[in-house]
Image (tube, rainbow, N blue to C red):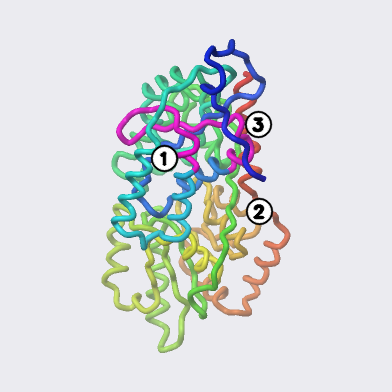
Amino acid sequence: MKPRPFADPTACAAVPPPPVRSIEPEIVLDLTRLLSRVRHPTPTGVDRVEMHYARTLLARVPERLQFAATHPLGRYGRLDPGNVLRFLDATERRWREIGERETRGAAWRHLIKALAGLRPQRIAPATRPRILLQVSPSALDKPARVAARLRREDARLVCLIHDLIPIAEPGFARQDGPRRHARRMIGVARHAHGVIANSHATAATLTSYLGAIGEPVPRVLVNPLGAARFVSDPPPLDGPYFLCLGTIEPRKNHLLLLHLWRQLAEEADGHPIPRLVLIGRRGWENQNTFNLLDRCPRLRPHVQELGRVSDRTLSAWLGGASALLMPSFAEGFGLPVAEALAAGTPVIASDLPAHREAGGEVPDYLDPLDGPGWRRRILDYADPGSPARRAQLARMRGVLPRTWENHVERALAFADEVARS
């Protein structure tokens, strides 16, 4: 069905009508994250979430949806809806088809077009309750700026919290990560009228942290993320291989897998071993892992590091993998787990509450430090007749994946409750 046009509060009459308060609030989706990432041809998980919200809200409630953003040059305001649609289309094409193959010239053309077309415009006065919906952490570490934005919008703030890992697990964060994330959570406590938590684990950590520092706890909705379905091309490899997806940073525990594959290579004695495929950019403070990738000759024939790839390339690798491997030490939700299961790919994951919320009873869960256990499970799944893999595929058939439509529907109902409170 063709989306209905956006409401234009400046059109039609020269004399504005008197304000009328409607039951259903206006939804203003903040696209600051996507606009700030305009130079990057491949998305992060947070980028994907903001895109899914934009697309699903456009399909669900176009008549009461507006977009806003803080421009990279600093100004905050409303965005032209037609230019937003063109920006979303172009961004998804880059993610899906181009990815790491984008030329520098094409990247600059996209950047200039997006920054010119998405110049912030004036904010019309609210004629009904208004919800500012923010699904990324952009600017939440600047509470004064958040407060000023809410005054300009005459709106209530509903924000999505992805995780509290920099606070709960500071050893896995960048040096300034814990302090910056603490400021974000204080901003949420003082200015958000409602919080959407992507998991019970995130909600519990948020509630505990705010209580410990004496800050108020906003109303919280636990709303697990949806799982997008990738259209898969034929897999790039015929033989068995395993996929590990995510930024190569310490908390993702790539080191466990690299040591395991080095051990397999040393013991292979000429026999074939499965391939390990890594998709994700290199992160920070992870030199031991980078050294193994760059300098270990035993790993080179068996470990393939692809970096950032297009969604089409990602879907091909995901669809043909013997399993997705997620040995993380900490996660807020575990979106790759949900997306792998939606694609019909088995998952072997670390036994974290967030992973269990994303995957339910379908994946096989292991302690992230249990090297022998991971080795046994990987070798088992590499066998085409693996009973454990067949059992997981059978469990998968009985589970319907969560959709973004379900997620956004619940978020909208929550926003309506917040607007009425």
**Residue 67 falls inside the magenta stretch:** yes
Residue at 50% x, 17% y is 125
Residue that numbered label 1 is attached to: 33
Give left or right: position of 122 versus 342: left
Of the residues shown, which amino acid type is indicated by label 2? Pro
Q: Nearer the viewer, mark 2 or mark 1?
A: 1
Of the residues shown, which amino acid type is indicated by label 1? Arg
Residue at 53% x, 47% y is 333
Q: Nearer the viewer, mark 2 or mark 3?
A: 3
Give residue 401's mark.
Answer: 2
Q: Residues within 10 Å of mark 3 (few under 14, many from 20)?
A: few
Q: Position of residue 77 (x, y in %)?
A: 41, 27
Q: Name the quadrant of the C terminus.
A: top right
Above or below residue 362? Residue 71 is above
Separation (CA) of disc 3 from disc 1: 24 Å
Q: Nearer the viewer, residue 221 or 314?
A: 314
Q: Position of residue 383 (x, y in %)?
A: 57, 79
Of the residues shown, which amino acid type is indicated by label 3? Ala
Q: Secondary structure at mark 1?
A: helix
The mark nearer the N terminus, 2 or 1, is 1
- Magenta part of the chain: 56-85
Q: Secondary structure at mark 3?
A: helix
Give left or right: position of 389 versus 112: right
Residue that numbered label 3 is attached to: 413
